[in-house]
Image (cartoon, rainbow, N blue to C red):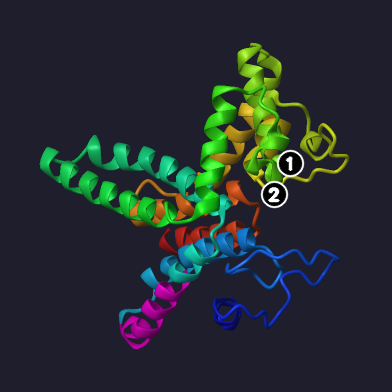
């Protein structure tokens, strides 16, 4: 939060990047100690999920003692998350919401009363609209979204001429994978182009996409993505609470947006809680 303070005052206490020779300016954004706002955003989301998960299973008396600090940390983390202004973070939230909707429909819409379903659905819509209002104030995110629509409508558009071209090593593998569907290339749709193929694509000799979704779809196809997803969600029990499913969805969505080892820490805590219950 010291970094956040200095960012807001247009002064950098710590340089954005200090482990290689890239001193590009990212503007008034919250970033991590390793120099990238996208890494900071993913850390904040997954760490929030870990904190909430652990807090739920703490002894009640201890919860009362740390409650003010817990709430303060949650609010500061959410505030810092939006100040990262990371497009990858938005993608992570969207992916997490898509996964959560599956559980929401399965656990509530198919099992609960109609009026209760409507109530929960309205709350979810209000939450998503609130997030949209905040995101709409971030100019670069709006530009990226506009560029994505252009590429979807006309895949032949030169990505170098678009703002999102700055993230080409994350976008190009996904565009290549989508092109398999238009060409009915069943082999690459199901099995991908081979492990680490996304690291060497087009003009990028060593692309190394930040997006794990780009990697797994282009490298291992739909089957590889399905196996990974089943592995991640296998830590849930039949009696797992909806809040645990929500937290896992958000952590996994963020992991797909930007690869982060913090997902494995979250999975270890879930497995520990699962074993303790048994």
Choose between 5 and 56: the one closer to the eye. Answer: 5
Image quarter for residue 229? top right
Image x and y of residue 222, in percent: 61, 27
63 magenta-colored: yes
Q: Secondary structure at mark 1?
A: helix
The N terminus sits in image quarter: bottom right
Image x and y of residue 128, in percent: 34, 49
Measure the alpha-carbon separation of dots 1 and 2: 8 Å
* Residue 235 makes an appearance in the image: no
The residue that disc 1 covers is 169
The C terminus sits in image quarter: bottom left
Which residue is at a point 60% across and 81% down the rendered structure image? 6
Compared across the picture, whether 29 is left or right of 76 comes to right
Which numbered disc, 1 or 2, marks the residue that appears first in the sequence?
1
Q: Nearer the viewer, mark 1 or mark 2?
A: 1
Magenta residues, dominant SS class: helix
The residue that disc 2 covers is 210
Image x and y of residue 162, in percent: 65, 38
Q: Which mark is residue 24?
A: none
Image x and y of residue 206, in percent: 85, 43
What segment is highlighted magenta in the picture?
A: 61-77
Disc 2: CA contacts within 10 A as few (<14), some (14-19) or many (>=20) = some
Residue positioned most to the right? 205
Q: Secondary structure at mark 2?
A: loop
Image quarter for residue 167? top right
Which residue is at a point 57% across and 37% down the rendered structure image? 147
């Amino acid at each position: 939060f010291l970094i956040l303070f200095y960012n807001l005052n247009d002064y950098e206490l710590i340089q954005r990047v200090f482990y290689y020779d890239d001193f590009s300016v990212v503007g008034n954004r919250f970033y991590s100690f390793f120099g990238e706002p996208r890494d900071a955003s993913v850390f904040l989301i997954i760490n929030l999920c870990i904190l909430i998960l652990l807090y739920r299973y703490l002894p009640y008396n201890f919860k009362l003692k740390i409650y003010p600090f817990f709430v303060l940390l949650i609010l500061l983390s959410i505030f810092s998350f939006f100040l990262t202004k990371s497009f990858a973070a938005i993608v992570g939230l969207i992916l997490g919401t898509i996964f959560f909707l599956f559980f929401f429909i399965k656990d509530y819409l198919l099992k609960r009363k109609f009026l209760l379903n409507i109530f929960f659905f309205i709350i979810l819509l209000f939450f998503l609209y609130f997030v949209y209002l905040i995101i709409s104030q971030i100019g670069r995110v709006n530009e990226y979204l506009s560029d994505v629509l252009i590429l979807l409508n006309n895949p032949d558009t030169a990505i170098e001429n678009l703002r999102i071209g700055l993230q080409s090593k994350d976008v190009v593998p996904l565009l290549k994978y989508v092109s398999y569907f238009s060409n009915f290339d069943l082999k690459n749709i199901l099995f991908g182009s081979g492990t680490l193929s996304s690291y060497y694509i087009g003009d990028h000799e060593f692309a190394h996409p930040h997006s794990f979704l780009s990697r797994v779809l282009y490298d291992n196809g739909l089957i590889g993505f399905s196996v990974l997803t089943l592995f991640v969600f296998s830590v849930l029990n039949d009696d797992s609470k909806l809040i645990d499913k929500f937290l896992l969805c958000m952590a996994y969505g963020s992991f797909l947006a930007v690869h982060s080892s913090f997902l494995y820490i979250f999975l270890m805590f879930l497995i520990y809680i699962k074993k303790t219950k048994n």
